[in-house]
Image: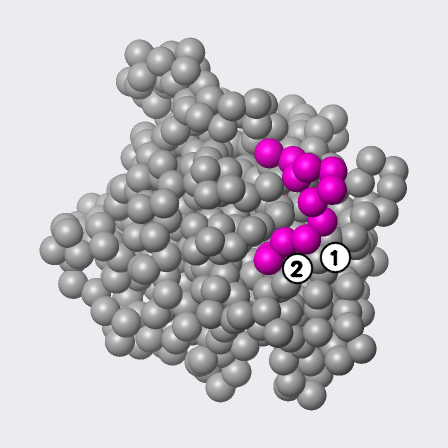
Amino acid sequence: MSPPRDQTRFDVVVAGSGAAALTAVLTAATGGLSVLIVEKSDRIGGTSAMSGAGTWIPANHLARAAAVADSAEETMRYFRAASPDGWEADEDALWRAFVANAAPMLEFVEQHSPLRYELIDEPDPQAEQPGGKMFGRMVSPRPLSRRIVGRYARRIRRSTLPHIFSYREAHGLDPYNHPIRAYGGLAPRLIWRWLTDTRGCGNALVTGLLKGCLDAGAKLLLGARVVGLVQRPDGRVAGVEVQHDGARHSFAAARGVVLATGGFEWNAALRETHFAGPLDRLGSPDTNEGDGQLLAERAGARLERMDQANVYPTLPTRYDGRLHGMPATFQSAPHGIVVDRTGRRFVSEYDYNLGEALDRRDASGAPIHLPAWLIGDARCVGRHLAFRWYARKERGWVRHAPDLASLAGAIGVPADALAATVARFNGFCAAGRDADFHRGESAWERYKSANRDGRKRNPTLAPIERAPFVAVPLNRSILGTKGGARTDDRGRVLRADGGVIPGLYCAGNAMANPIGTRALGAGTTIGPCMTWGYICARDMLGNAPP
Ligand SMILES: Cc1cc2nc3c(=O)[nH]c(=O)nc-3n(C[C@H](O)[C@H](O)[C@H](O)COP(=O)(O)OP(=O)(O)OC[C@H]3O[C@@H](n4cnc5c(N)ncnc54)[C@H](O)[C@@H]3O)c2cc1C
């Protein structure tokens, strides 16, 4: 619902319509506040609508019902053990706030929207660390018909991923590696979904959240960009300036403004400042240009974690008429390895946090491994139907050569080093163990290679020996940056001197994220995004107008 023309005063204005924004709106509107959602794009849901909606919620009620033992204490142990060195000192208070609010948030969302979640059989990527879990923290929404949001159904942002599947089905049946099994096995169900406009993953997430928000009375303005914050002389943020339909409008927000405008990956200047060096592709909507970060900075906020991002391998695809990144772990191929510009391996190719390794920097902030390459033999990606389908979208992306020396020459990697790396890897394959990076040995990597109990011969190790050889560039692709306004544990934006900017909140990828490039779970962007939206709104509900 758009606001009536004369309605310019609200309790809360939320910029953006992704998971962080809509969870804030649902919480605030259900609590009785009048809320306006301002979305820059003409489509609803941002990156969240495109996402798999794999959602990491420790000690959640579904796990409890399934008798999975988990607790806030265990989760905090995991945070401390699995996060990068030095982060605990800065992030402990925010980790605690997330851990305390994540599970209540999920229950709240189920109670006040049509969303229903299911547990996903996926371990923590660092399950061996203290407090890590093999099962119970990953959840995702069950599919929903987009028709429940009426005329907005056609405005829900489409994904590059096949959202005809739920996250659970996509991970159980793996349509990327086994398209015939996945589509064929579920054919009647998928046809029914197509006929009823039912979708899973991020489209289900945004449909369900939006329905809850509209039912609770929230108003929505599409194609409207927040371009300024109304700030009183005492520093309090009391509303927003919005560019809409060629004119500038003011909306007052008595309780506060939430900036949930996503990352800044589409802002070339900001991106080149914080992520200089080779970039493969972006995976989010092009409206994520860092508006929230810049608005907060202008209001006096301290920006932090600007060099953090969701870095993930992508395949080339087309979206909105141009090349775009579709997340896919195509580099996890038995007959392939990833080498850096010196021709050496630097990470296990099956590591969930491969993106963190690709983004490793030197003291000046420059990437130390890039450009990086997936190197394989004829069996690596060449026989793979889905890979070939996407590879055709970017001409010249995959390089072929009859031998490794010519391949090295074609990509500018030292031939001796590449030959030595491949020989060493082939030796590991013969021995059945990767002595350098333990590929296929961690709980996550065993899970992903269908070798859960580790009893099979390591299926991730297969030699690179058959011509033609292939090289595929594998640099950073960014699904969303994770830096922005530093907030306190109530989601309130902080100034450089540590004081609070009254009335200004920030959530999701627009905030300085307490979980950065290193993911702690496969859903540690969506889970925290939603939880921070919930935390901001809960604070506003307890914050009467001055
Ligand atoms: C294909 C894909 C799959 C993914 N799968 C997962 C997954 O399974 N699990 C997971 O945890 N993460 C996943 N991610 C990452 C995750 O989707 C994002 O990190 C997350 O959705 C970010 O949410 P957000 O609410 O912060 O921002 P977004 O969802 O990006 O929403 C931001 C919105 O703000 C709007 N906006 C920007 N500027 C303004 C302005 N000035 N005024 C008004 N509106 C503005 C934008 O148009 C956008 O709609 C995936 C990402 C991609 C691309």
The magenta segment is: 1-12
Residue displayed at 21% across by 65% down: 70
Work out whether residue 411 or residue 306 is closer to the camera in this orientation and state it: 306
Tally of numbered tags? 2
**Above/below status of 26 relative to 500:** above
Which amino acid type is shown beneath numbered disc 2? Ala
Percent coordinates x, y for residue 106 in the rendering: 34, 53
Camera-nearest label, 1 or 2: 2
Residue 360: tell me if it is visible. no
Going by the image, does 325 lie left or right of 216? right
Residue bearing the label numbered 1? 240
Is residue 4 in the magenta section?
yes
Q: Please, what is the three-letter code of the amino acid marked with disc 1? A: Val
Rendered location of residue 528, percent (x, y): 46, 60
Q: Identify the residue under disc 2.
A: 253
Image spot of residue 462 (x, y percent):
38, 43
